[in-house]
Amino acid sequence: MSSASLLAVEQLRVRYRNGAIGIADVSLQVAPGQVVALFGPNGAGKTSTVRGISGFLKTEGARVTGGRVTFDGHNVTNAEPHRQAKLGIAFVPERDKVFPTLTVSENLLALGTLPRPARRKELQDFVSGLLSGGQRQMLALARAIMSDPKLLIVDEMTLGLHHSLLPVLATAIEAIESTGTSILLVDESTGFALETAHYCYLLAAGEVVEEGPPEKFHGSELLAAGYVDRAPC
């Protein structure tokens, strides 16, 4: 793993309380200001990977049983989510992205970790542009950005989203990237992820089976092989 990485995941292994293996061997890294995408079929271990990184495995009855997660020079393996947040990791989960009973403003302030007032005003001005469409996904992104993270992890960002809104979402990701925030993106829309990512990892059966820049995956058989040939874990 490169010493310049903001996030370094080394041979991560996740096991659930019932004994099932969520991921068997996943290694990846994210550099400062980089957008990285995770692909793979249902059951490949994508969500287990990002929950293992962000500290949210406990809510799923699982834990990291092998490997190491290092963020900004800190060993955060199996660390609690609130510690991750203080270090600069924001996580947008696959489901329950926002609080439906709260207003937009209340959602934005619902995080426990917020920056100083002056910086908070800057972020509020920034996220107001993201919310122009009013989509729940935009609100989820905006709420995560309010913590002023170094790394934003987004699980299944386009799930259930109409394809006509993908360009708007891509613009939002580019805007967040331009601020220097790194992004780790898991998405069901391979095309969307390939258009927004700088580097990609293909997961199958709980392992990384291929990696490289987006160009490596465009028009190739790698994605088809990853989605079809490997049995899900």
Image (tube, grey):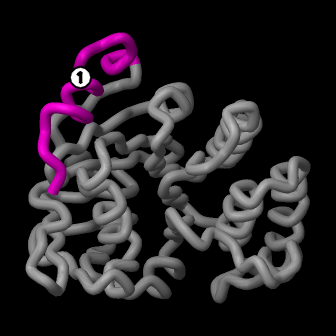
Residue at left offset 40%, top offset 23%:
214
Whether residue 73 is visible to the viewer of this picture, yes or no, is no
Residue 45 position, x and y percent, is 25, 57
Residue at left offset 12%, top offset 68%:
21
Q: Is residue 223 left or right of residue 162?
A: left
Magenta run includes residue 223: yes
Which residue in the protein does label 1 denote? 222
Residue at left offset 21%, top offset 32%:
228
Q: Amino acid at mark 1?
A: Leu
Residue 22 lies in what quarter of the image?
A: bottom left
Residue 105 position, x and y percent, is 88, 76
Residue 30 position, x and y percent, is 38, 48
Q: Quadrant of the C terminus?
A: bottom left
Q: Which residues are magenta?
A: 215-233
Whether residue 75 is visible to the viewer of this picture, yes or no, is yes
Q: Is residue 144 left or right of residue 230?
A: right
Q: Nearer the viewer, residue 166 or 178?
A: 166
Q: Is residue 55 left or right of residue 208?
A: right
